[in-house]
Image (spheres, helix red, strand yellow):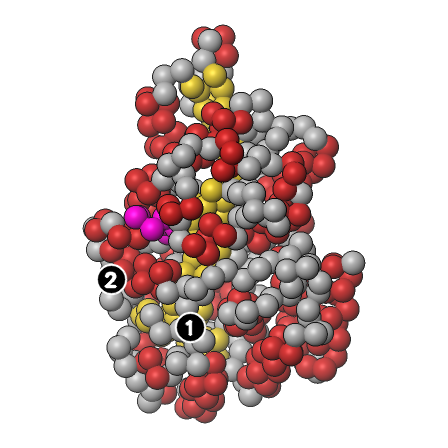
Amino acid sequence: MRHHFRRTGQAGPARRAIATASAVAAVGLVTVACGGDDAAADGKLQLSISTFNEFGYEELYAEYERLHPDIDIVVHETGQGGPYHQSLFTKLGAGSGLDDVVAVEEAHLPEVLDKSSRFHDLTEIGPKEAGPDRWLDWKYEAALDKDGRLIGYGTDIGPLAMCYRKDLFEQAGLPSEPDEVAELFESWDSYFAAGDEFVANVDGVAWFDSAAQIFNAMQNQLDVGYFDRQDRLTVESNPEIKRNWDRVTDAVARGQSAGLVAFSNEWNSGFTQSAFATKTCPSWMLGVIEEQAGEDLAGAWAVTDAFPGGPRNWGGSYLAVPTQSEHPEEAAALAAWLTAPEQQIKAFKAAGVFPSQVEALESPDLLSATNDYFDGPPMGELFAEQAKAIGEAQYKGPGDGKIQENALSPALQAVEQGTSPAEGWERFVDAAKQIAS
């Protein structure tokens, strides 16, 4: 059985990432009334759900209606995560217009938790079987507000591995087999040292695609991120953030970055043009690489579970029930069913979304999943082990995703284009302060 772990790529720090404002006008909203437009006239209860990109739920909606013949599901699907979340927060502020169940991407979860009083505590209205033991601890705990209320049921996750070009490694004289490259990726120091060796031996090819993509992975590994648990900005007070900035910008100065903006047209073309040799790879990135690199590079890309600094997560979403819902218990039951282990495996088969449920991570259907585009061990097993090795989720304060997207990334892009690291750091800090104020 072959699964691609395919996700729709977009700009931003996570799997269903933040789209630019210019994309708003280009994104359409698809409404699907699974039971028909006259569902209410039939005396059935209508439940509405809104999602973005691809959750793999299409067949699951129909199955739920078969199991619950008194319910019709109305689906609102938005193509890109950025416009979707803009609309979500606009309706949240207006106090009306939200569906019974709403999807929330990981990067926007802090903003939802900051307004948690406008969402139901799922431990109070949800079915008893949807308890904390269902999920990986860090996935469940990330959706708890400061009062311990559960605001969302976890959907997918994005455990990290490293993707690399075997043929380019061989050209550079580096170890190239997945079981041989662990030493190169043991730490960020060894990763950047290998990058120096690579760029010294291969002309015209960078070591990595984007400074912001590398920094994002490093940032997610810190015990304290952009905010502490009191929602105080830590950009200046946490020396690890500046240390990571220095390590990444030093690598840029030594020619290791291709200087590409992730998910831009130039970045997409960079795969076919062999512009870089390594790529940070959350599970959803495999489908992006295969789509952009094309069949000519099948087998040239490999995946290893060795990741500098150890396993972490990058991406994933939740299903929440706003207090605007007129049918909160029924909505919570639908959200709990969609995120149950059995349904997470079905969604994985349909769309490659990687499960966050403990039981799902033990499923033979998941563990045996392979992708013959890439060299390496069975992909399902590799990413399941990475997911289980993650200790806890980094706390994300309100504005965390905006800092990553609108402060950090532009500042690093400026450095890649010639701005000094010192000036770039000042731009980053100033922009972060404005967002957090």
Residue that mark 2 sits on = 378
Q: In this view, does 32 lie to the left or right of 97?
A: left
In the rendered structure, which disc, 1 or 2, sits on the residue that comes first in sequence? 1
Q: How far apart are marks 1 and 2 (CA)?
A: 19 Å
Q: Residue 310 carries which label?
A: 1
Asked if one can make out residue 386 in the rendered structure from this viewpoint, the answer is yes
- Which residue is at 33% across, 86% downward? 174
- Tag 1: amino acid: Gly
Does 195 sit above or below residue 361?
below
- Residue 129 is left or right of residue 429, and the answer is left
Residue in front for this viewpoint, 193 or 433: 433
Where 208 falls versus 292 (above or below)?
below
Compared across the picture, whether 224 is left or right of 137 comes to: right
Q: Is mark 1 on a helix, strand or loop?
A: loop
Q: Mark 1 against mark 2, which lies toward the viewer?
A: 1
Residue stretch in magenta: 354-360
